Image: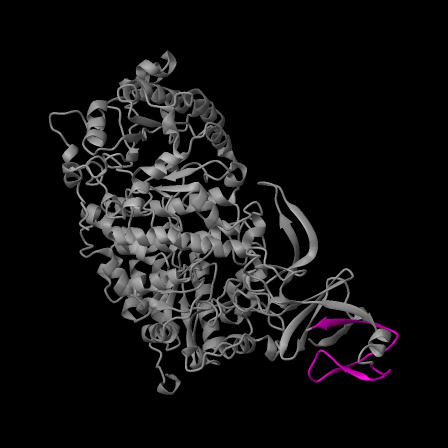
Amino acid sequence: MMTAAELPVRDRSRSVLQTGIVDADVHNMYPAPGALVPYLSQRWARHLETIGLRTTVPYRDNATTFFKLAPAISRRDAWPPGGGLPGSDLAFLREQLLDGVNVRWGVLNFLTSLEDQLNEEWAAAMARAMNDWQIAEWLDPEPRLRASIVVQAQNPELAVAEIERLGGHPGFVQVLMPNRTAEPLGRRKHWPIFEAAERHGLTIGMHTNDSWRIPPNSGWYSYYLEDHTLLSGTTQSQLASLVLGGVFERFPGLRVVCIEGGFAWMPALMQRLDAVWRRLGDEIPDVVRPPSEYLREQVWVTTQPMEEPARPRQLLDVIEQMGADRIMFATDYPHWDSDDPVHAFPLKLPHDIETMIFRDNAARLYGFPIEEDTGV
Amino acid sequence: MSRHVVARTDELADGERKIVEIEGRSIGLFRVGDAWYAVRNTCPHQSGPLCRGYLTGLLESDGPGEFRYSRRGEMLRCPWHGWEFDLRTGQSWVDPTRLRVRHYETTVEPGSALLTGTPPVAPGQRVPGPYTAETYEVSVDHDYVVIEF
Amino acid sequence: MSAPTDARTEQSAPPTTGAVDVDVHHDLAAVEELFPYLDAHWRDYVVERGLPGFDTNYYPQASPMSVRPDLLRPDGPPPATDPATVAADVLDRTGSSTAILNCLYGVQPMQNEYLAAALSSALNDWQRERWLAVDPRLRASIVVPTQNAELAAREIDRTAADGAFVQVLMFVRDRMQLGKRFFWPIYEAAERHGLPIAVHPFGSFNHPNTPAGWASTYIEEYVAQAQLFHAQVVSIVCQGVLARFPELRFVLLESGASWLPPLMWRFDKDWKGLRHDTPWVDRAPSDLIRRHFRLATAPLDVEGPDGLLRLIDQLGSDEMLLYSSDYPHHHHDPGVGSVLGLPDDLRQKVLSGNARALYPLDRGGHR
């Protein structure tokens, strides 16, 4: 149990940090995969017990072949005192996150290895179980939490069925998709998922992930330092695929949230996309506007892990360049690289920008009512 | 400056720590061998609870593939982002000149000295301890860790 | 600050007078041009199998990016194949004092490393006799068979004695990440001869071309070259190349440049927590990048001179950018417009000063 003196100093009265923020990336977890058994049919419960979740690396207990910083990739202070994995104990998550840093609304992104489950029925059964488990164990008991629908995107038909099943549930605000994929998300095979998300008013949350079925663009690296640094590049390539693949043009109501890929690269990416499009755009005549226009309208980014330039002012420059209205604060609780809302930004943000990034942008996107009494 | 008796030396084994509160500040006390280190329990990066982090050694290298590992247990890694701090100095490894955690001098003193120091503490007298609601009974039979605060 | 953005404007007045152009491409009209430089076995190998040559499809032939429209001369030689024409285009018409030729012929993608080694030697001899010998203002990069780093190093040793070879050329896509020890003999040789390593887009297609899988379209593949540069910079730093070869420099050609600062910011932060995998990275990665990496200016992916000033500020160094035309490619952002809008001293550094500090240009061209 933390003592009061251990809690970071939070002295920003009159700020949304005091009155309540939106956390756009919170990771819930089961204590153990067996927690899903009540939500699986007999067949699939047996499958879980006998085969389990397959990974694409030949280890039983490691999800990758290069090794991460900390157990469960988590903050060492996030292990629930009562046992279980970080993020698995709602009471402790309330204490450490929701109450601890004034989170008024939190969006759960339950990370799975479903993209590596190539038995498609199994993956779909697990997705259903995971979503039902989220409803029963997270959304029903905690009104401050909303969740992303977990799908297995490899089979869009089954993914769409899951979106149809849950799209009307008020607890779900987003469809969670991986950004490390075997095929870029802009590919036409994924479009039914975007169509369903658009129809239900759900955002697509594109979250960084581990999937090692295909090698990275330049071959395998050796170290987590390489992997983690390069996650932002994967996000950029996926955005290029979505916009150049015509997804935003075809689905103008679609809204995509890039989660955990950082954001400081956005102005450079926009510049590059527009310039290349002016020269090579004939190849993709369906993309009728400069790519940056689609990105400005239909893409949101979360802040964590915050880029930290040696001169903090440069970060504010980037925010001013790209516009603050598409940036949403996220903690990534309980992972090791999570950001603390008070200390994450290396400089004091102007008040209006702070309010947008820490609350209003996400509240508008996800439809969370902003209560006036929490306003400033 | 104030002096605070925060632990009996036999209270912590090698590699163990305890987190104490002095004048409203959370402080981590670490025992490494027979050395005692005290640092502020707040990471200067994002204010994480530094003293709940992992203790590791000093890792240096003479070139790719070369690993020189020393001072095992003297480097404290923040439980959040893994930044390393030297328990001896409070300096961060990655930016030693600009980034450091507040660290405090510690001394080990026999109970007898505490009881006869200035001002002297009479045998059996209670000395303010590490927790606000707790006090330490100093006895001549034991040694104590004192933080200079 | 009006920025000339098309090729004709660039040519009408030569504001690039005295510049060092670090990325100019030249080409073979036909594979037979190499025959005088290949031994009989490899000549017969190519002929017997009817191999049409090893022209690369990095730039689709009729794509609007592949050739500047003013270089399509109906009655002239194919673009970039005639030394006198290229010299006139890149030097006489622009005022540039020096141009570095980077040969994109398809040596590295083939699986036969011995044919690759023979072709590399042939191409270097061809470069020397057909190009460097006709104009002392020309310099070239050494073509190496990266399939076999030992043979590649041997080729560097054989070629570097000629002072007109000022660089070793590699590609952003290869069989493995460029930081891996597999390639270190190349770096050892380059450092020993005081030659930087240039890294050019495309190369060997051994892995998906984006970190999210194979791209659908050329435009998507082209945009994603930047993410390949991300991966190689991170690899070269993390694997310890710069610790092992402290005098080695890398020149990133045609990478876009403006992607680098945000990557440095993320890389530095991650290194602070994750450095235990790579303790030989004993300072912030951005410090190493500033010291060891250079970026060519075509394209820049910035908005005009102000954008370029911001980029230089973000990089934290005014010594990293090297002027390039990327002749004959018709770039989406030639970069030169932004460069010419810089304040005098900065412009001078980018146009020539930084390149002169980097390359052994004083070893002399031919004649």
For the C terminus of chain A, the quadrant is bottom left
Horizontal arrangement in the rendering, residue B116 relative to residue C244 (left or right) = right
Q: Quadrant of residue B101?
A: bottom right
Residue A173: give x, y in percent of width and height: 36, 72
As drawn, the residue found furthest toward the top would be: C40
Which stretch did the figure color magenta? B121-148
Total residue callouts: 0
Q: Nearer the viewer, residue A335 or C366?
A: C366
Q: Nearer the viewer, residue C157 or C43?
A: C157
Horizontal arrangement in the rendering, residue A19 relative to residue C23 (left or right) = right
Taking the magenta stretch, the answer to whether it contains residue C226 is: no
Residue C114: give x, y in percent of width and height: 43, 22
**As displayed, is residue A113 above or below residue B39?**
above
Residue at horizontal 38 percent and vertical 41 percent from the top: C294
Taking the magenta stretch, the answer to whether it contains residue B135 is: yes
Residue at horizontal 85 percent and vertical 78 percent from the top: B116
Q: Nearer the viewer, residue C277 or C90?
A: C90
Residue B52: give x, y in percent of width and height: 63, 67
For the N terminus of chain A, the quadrant is bottom right
Residue A16: give x, y in percent of width and height: 41, 78
Q: Is residue A133 visible?
A: yes
The colour scheme is: one colour
**As displayed, is residue C127 above or below residue A286?**
above
As drawn, the residue found furthest toward the bottom would be: A373
Q: Is residue A119 visible?
A: no
Horizontal arrangement in the rendering, residue C206 relative to residue A275 (left or right) = right
**As displayed, is residue A261 above or below residue C198?**
below
Residue at horizontal 65 percent and vertical 79 percent from the top: B23
